Image (cartoon, grey):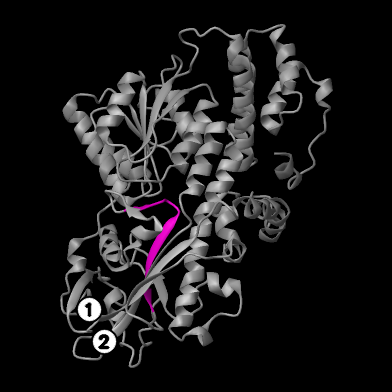
């Protein structure tokens, strides 16, 4: 907190010793400092009960933290540091107090829906709620509705919170709500969150389907505000007056299946007269990497601003914020590289195959370059250039083209390490390690894509620096399943048939997600016009 405030205006310095013990404890929370915490808790215990200290002093400090975060005056990593102090204080006080009914503000069960392996957003909600007086039952990832309802009943939870990163997860949430109607358990208020959700989809479409209360939480602090509304507090406002205003928009649509059917009108892309020769047919693996070489390929903007969620405050210019990031985030990045160098286990499977593009299909051939092995079906833009991934390959009747695939992972040790940090209450490091794991997997994909381009004889067309690499200023592109140009996650199964990545420890979930989470796959296209595009 002090680091962030240093980027603003000088804070009026007040010696903690001159503050009352109540204010000193609040400063411990707000500043995220544990020095003398237990001493000050002991002083407070001379006047207050442990429960009074938690409810009337420490939670007041956490409320201030939430207000600072909401006003853009506190960054998420420092919020988590405050939560660490809160957890330490509660742990110290718990043995000294009697458990009584009504000592919690409310209760919620949190789960990532079936088939989805992402849990960072859910766990951040857990951290914020549990350190603001709520009882949280966090049952993890890939949870079917049966388990969710059983656990909610067993633990007597008042609210159910569902999370998921994928578009498909939003459909599972919808199915869960409909089944809850059918089972007669719509008395549970439900809070939904995840990157693919929109407020309008939840508050308009899903709210119209679910017989109970369903709300959208954009982040952990909005989840906190909703719990104060629906989590059992007597002073809560009426449910039809939520703290966050409703919005009007359209539902989150599925991609129109007709876009996958070729109607005879293609794009203006001309296939390559000469494409790179096949370096080899089939799949190979590589398992020996220098971790520090891979760390060079991490995009600091994606890490600092995306994963670690350092946001530019209104009063700072872009150059000023960049300088602040170099001073604050760069040393953390350097430290994390040393910590994770022996934790990550980078491995790659990659391969090359003969192919043709036909209509909206990409036909993959056997080694004889004639017998069809399998085919991918991609959507086509209805407007604009009417692009489709298959357009970037030669047509049947001409010599076969070359397509590459890769799948990369940094292993599951990172996820295990994350869980250890989360369970210990080392929340700030949990965020840092998770972000490093995700971006190291992306860095490995970037690095190996570069190796593939070299293997295909395209090294002379490489950008001169990392900035050019991150901006994809090289020939061709790599497209990952689940993203705009090839949104069908089920196609991961075909990639698995080609590369067989089980021998590097990667498997598919029921919803065609890669496990371990810090893994990514792609189709490698070498056509000079191949760049990222949206279907809609």
Residue 254 vs residue 25, the one in the foreground:
25
Judge whether residue 514 is colored magenta: yes
For the point 63% across and 29% down, the residue is: 64
Secondary structure of residue under mark 1 = strand
Residue at which label 2 appears: 400
59 in magenta: no
* Residue identified by numbered label 1: 365
Left or right: 1, with 112 as reference point: right
Q: In which quadrant is the C terminus drawn?
A: bottom left
Seen in the picture, residue 403 relative to 326 is either above or below; the reply is below
Asked if 370 appears above or below 520 in the picture, the reply is: below
Q: How many marks?
A: 2
Q: Most prominent secondary structure in the magenta stretch?
A: strand
**N-term mark: 1 or 2:** 1
Distance (Cα) linking label 1 and label 2: 9 Å
Q: Position of residue 457 (x, y in %)?
A: 46, 86
Q: Tell me where residue 172 appears, x and y as whole percent.
A: 26, 43
| Residue extent of the magenta highlight | 513-525
Please report contact status of discs 1 and 2: CB closer than 8 Å, yes or no: yes
Query: Badge 1 local density, few (<14 within 10 Å), some, or many (20+)?
Result: some
Task: Tell me where residue 362 appears, x and y as whole percent.
Answer: 24, 75
Q: Is residue 190 visible?
A: yes
Report whether residue 71 is seen.
no
Q: Is residue 531 above or below residue 424?
A: below
């Amino acid at each position: 907190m002090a680091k962030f405030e240093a980027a603003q205006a000088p804070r009026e310095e007040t010696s903690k010793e001159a503050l009352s013990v109540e204010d000193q404890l609040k400063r411990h929370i707000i500043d995220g400092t544990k020095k003398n915490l237990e001493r000050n808790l002991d002083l407070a215990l001379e006047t207050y009960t442990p429960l009074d200290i938690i409810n009337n002093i420490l939670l007041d400090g956490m409320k201030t933290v939430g207000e600072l975060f909401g006003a853009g005056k506190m960054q998420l990593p420092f919020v988590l540091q405050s939560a660490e102090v809160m957890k330490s204080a509660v742990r110290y006080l718990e043995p000294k107090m009697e458990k009584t009914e009504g000592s919690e503000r409310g209760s919620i069960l949190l789960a990532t829906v079936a088939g989805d392996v992402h849990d960072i957003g859910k766990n951040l909600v857990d951290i914020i709620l549990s350190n603001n007086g709520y009882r949280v039952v966090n049952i993890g990832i890939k949870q079917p509705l049966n388990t969710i309802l059983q656990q909610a009943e067993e633990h007597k939870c008042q609210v159910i919170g569902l999370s998921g990163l994928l578009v498909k997860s939003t459909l599972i949430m919808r199915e869960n709500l409909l089944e809850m109607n059918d089972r007669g358990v719509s008395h549970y208020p439900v809070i939904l969150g995840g990157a693919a959700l929109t407020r309008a989809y939840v508050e308009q479409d899903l709210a119209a389907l679910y017989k109970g209360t369903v709300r959208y939480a954009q982040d952990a602090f909005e989840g906190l505000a909703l719990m104060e509304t629906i989590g059992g507090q007597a002073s809560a406002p009426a449910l039809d007056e939520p703290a966050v205003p409703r919005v009007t928009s359209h539902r989150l649509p599925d991609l129109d299946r007709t876009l996958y059917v070729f109607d005879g009108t293609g794009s203006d892309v001309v296939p390559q007269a000469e494409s790179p020769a096949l370096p080899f047919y089939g799949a190979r693996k590589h398992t020996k990497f220098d971790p520090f070489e891979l760390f060079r390929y991490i995009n600091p903007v994606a890490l600092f601003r995306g994963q670690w969620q350092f946001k530019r405050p209104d009063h700072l210019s872009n150059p000023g914020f960049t300088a602040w990031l170099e001073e604050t985030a760069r040393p953390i990045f350097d430290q994390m590289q040393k910590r994770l160098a022996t934790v990550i286990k980078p491995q790659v499977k990659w391969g090359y195959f003969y192919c043709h593009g036909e209509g909206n299909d990409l036909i993959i051939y056997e080694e004889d370059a004639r017998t069809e092995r399998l085919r991918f079906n991609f959507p086509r833009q209805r407007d604009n250039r009417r692009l489709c991934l298959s357009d970037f390959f030669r047509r049947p009747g001409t010599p076969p083209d070359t397509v590459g695939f890769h799948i990369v992972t940094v292993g599951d040790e990172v996820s295990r390490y994350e869980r250890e940090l989360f369970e210990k209450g080392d929340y700030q490091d949990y965020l840092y390690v998770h972000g490093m794991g995700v971006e190291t997997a992306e860095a490995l994909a970037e690095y190996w894509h570069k190796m593939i381009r070299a293997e295909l004889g395209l090294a002379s067309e490489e950008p001169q620096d990392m900035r050019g690499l991150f901006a994809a200023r090289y020939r061709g592109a790599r497209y990952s399943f689940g993203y705009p140009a090839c949104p069908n996650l089920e196609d991961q199964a075909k990639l698995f048939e080609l590369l067989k990545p089980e021998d590097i420890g990667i498997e598919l979930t029921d919803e065609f997600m890669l496990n371990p989470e810090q893994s990514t796959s792609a189709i490698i296209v070498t056509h000079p016009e191949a760049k990222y595009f949206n279907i809609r």
